Image: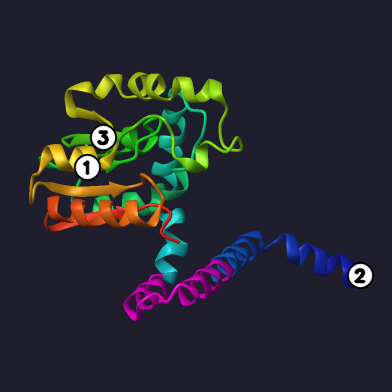
Amino acid sequence: MTNRPRSENTYSKGHPKKRNQLKSYYSALKTLISEALYLSKTYAPVDVFYSLFSTFHQRRDLPRKYRTKSDAFEQTKLGLTLSNDWFSSNIPFWLFVIDKYGLQSGDVKVLEIGSWEGLSSYFILYEMPSAHLTCVDTWEGADEHKDGTADSATIFSQIEQNFDKNLSSFSYRLSKHKGTSLSFFTKSNIRNHYDFVYIDGSHHCDDVLLDAIKSFEMLKVGGIMVFDDYL
């Protein structure tokens, strides 16, 4: 004979998938509300709000859709020398963009502003096997890395060495510009060249605006531009 409490407990254990789905949904909803409040506070244009809300289900579902490929890259990542990982949470969304726009094939030219130890750089060259990547970085860290909370002096001395080591197997598809993004834009002065641009350099508003404008000039019509830390 089974009493009522035992029956309820058995029912609960029998539906872990449903509980996980609800938990995932409410977590995504909480994030959505937080992001919407931030956009409101910063006077974001209406089309940004539309994009945020219209992609809610997509952003919730993509991590599950690309879990297998994400997990595979997590294993590959174990072979890299890394002191931080600020990129891996983006992987499902990048995989979606790569699939949607067919970036895994063809002569794809990519510009990355801000490369750090090369995790995102490695991912680009790993997932886009015909791409050529141009990396721009001072390899000295930005202000948020110099306050003593993100990294130590020992790590700073190894940043560029780690980048070079991590990307050594892709050296034939990699161009490296050591310096500020402004120095790169001044020296390059090219237009309509890149298919994909990733901006994750200095987070000062004037620098981000400069990176956005100058990179957009270098981006092909129909090209893709991705900003890290948009919110």
Mark 2 lies on residue: 3
Q: Secondary structure at mark 2?
A: loop
**Residue 111: which disc?**
1
Q: Is residue 156 magenta?
A: no
Stretch of the chain drawn in magenta: 30-55
Amino acid type, mark 2: Asn
* Amino acid type, residue under disc 3 in the picture: Cys
Q: Quadrant of residue 140?
A: top left
Of marks 1 and 2, which one's residue comes earlier in the chain?
A: 2
Helix, strand or loop under label 1: strand
Residue on which the image places disc 3: 135
Q: Residue at 28%, 32% (x, y): give it.
A: 179
Give me the residue at 31% from left, 48% from top: 199
Residue 32 shown in magenta: yes
Picture coordinates of residue 230, whole percent (x, y): 41, 59
Callout 2 crowding tier (Cα within 10 Å): few <14, some 14–19, many ≥20: few
Q: Quadrant of residue 209?
A: bottom left
Q: Is residue 101 among the parts visible in the rendering?
A: no
